[in-house]
Image (spheres, grey):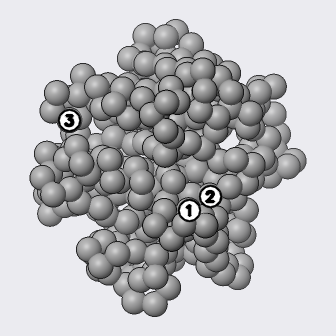
Amino acid sequence: MSGLNRRTALMTAAGLAALPGLAGAQTIATDELIDLWPGAPPGGTNARIVRQIADQSKDAATPDRWVTGIDRPVLVVRRPARPNGAAMLVVPGGGYAFLSYDNEGTSQAAWLNARGVTVFILLYRLPGEGWARRQDVPLQDAQRAMRLIRANAVPLGVAKDRIGVLGFSAGGHLAGSLATRHGEVVYDPVDAADRQDARPDIAGLVYPVVSLDAPFTHGGSRDMLLGRDASADMRRARSVERRVDGATPPIFLVHATDDGLVPPANSIALFQAMEAAKRPVALHIFEDGGHGFGVRLPRTMQAAAWPDLFATFAAKHGLIPA
């Protein structure tokens, strides 16, 4: 995320289907879309939410779209040619102000698909777009997404006990919140899918926002999620490192020393909390890479190594074959 920097999204209809119109312009013919909620999402206030897509790229071959105006959250399914039963919920970042659909969505799906992983890109609602209980809106969508994947594991061709989450920047905060607050009630159940466990089997957090109350927090993400006047208690309650417990799944952390937007102290704080709770954790801090690098770094930059390291971590914890 360089400053406020990222991409695309969608609309949706019910069920699994490619959609016409606006969504069709953002997806490819083989995409499947899963509407998260059977009706209106929770917390609606009749605010006018208008979809906008801004492509930051000057190269049509490598789009870099940001999306705002998400009134109907959706999963975009990207299937591998040779599935191995593993699934990954991919959570783009964007400071809780927009979603980086390509850099932290479709680009991630490509390398994960190549390793046999079925990918579900989460296009979640943005808390500043007029929703009630804004602080819970992204986590509502993340919990619901994980439950829907589990509830439909057989038709989707994935194993219920091999579903991870991979999040970036503010999306890393959301993925970390899902990993540590998967059992917290943030919405009223709407159907049988909500009886499923929302806990991911592993979590990968790449240059994540972690703390919302420490001196090193990313203030923009904090304020977009909670509002500028959030209490100290609310900031603490939504700081990922404060929510680690014995049920937290294994966590993989990546950061670059030269990240000028979200300091690596965020990943370090979560690593220390995981260590204190005696939970499985890996931390990789690279000398260079900056922020928002996704998987597009040249191989000459050290942080380009993170996907292979994450694959090794996922294999150790049983998500993908070794």
- Circle 1 — which element? loop
Question: Tag 1 or tag 2, which sits nearer the N-term?
Answer: 2
Residue 14 position (above or below residue 58): below
Whether residue 320 can be seen here: yes
Q: Residue 110, position in %: x, y?
A: 33, 53
Question: Tag 2 or tag 3, which sits nearer the N-term?
Answer: 2
Question: Tag 3 or tag 1, which sits nearer the N-term?
Answer: 1
Q: Nearer the viewer, mark 3 or mark 2?
A: 2
- Which residue does the numbered mark 3 point to in the structure image? 320
**Residue plotted at (75% across, 49% down):** 3
Q: Are marks 2 and 1 in contact (CB under 8 Å)?
A: yes
Q: Is residue 257 left or right of residue 282?
A: right
Q: Residue 233, position in %: x, y?
A: 76, 34
Q: Nearer the viewer, mark 2 or mark 1?
A: 1
Q: Are marks 3 and 2 in contact (CB under 8 Å)?
A: no
Q: Residue 206, position in %: x, y?
A: 52, 36
- Circle 2 — which element? loop
**Tag 3: amino acid:** Ile
Mark 1 Cα shell of 10 Å, populated few (<14), some (14-19), many (≥20)? many
Report the label total: 3
Whether residue 174 can be seen here: no
Q: Nearer the viewer, residue 292 or 200?
A: 292
Residue 149 position (above or below residue 72): above
- Which residue does the numbered mark 2 point to in the structure image? 6
- Which residue does the numbered mark 1 point to in the structure image? 64
**Tag 2: amino acid:** Arg
Q: Nearer the viewer, mark 1 or mark 3?
A: 1
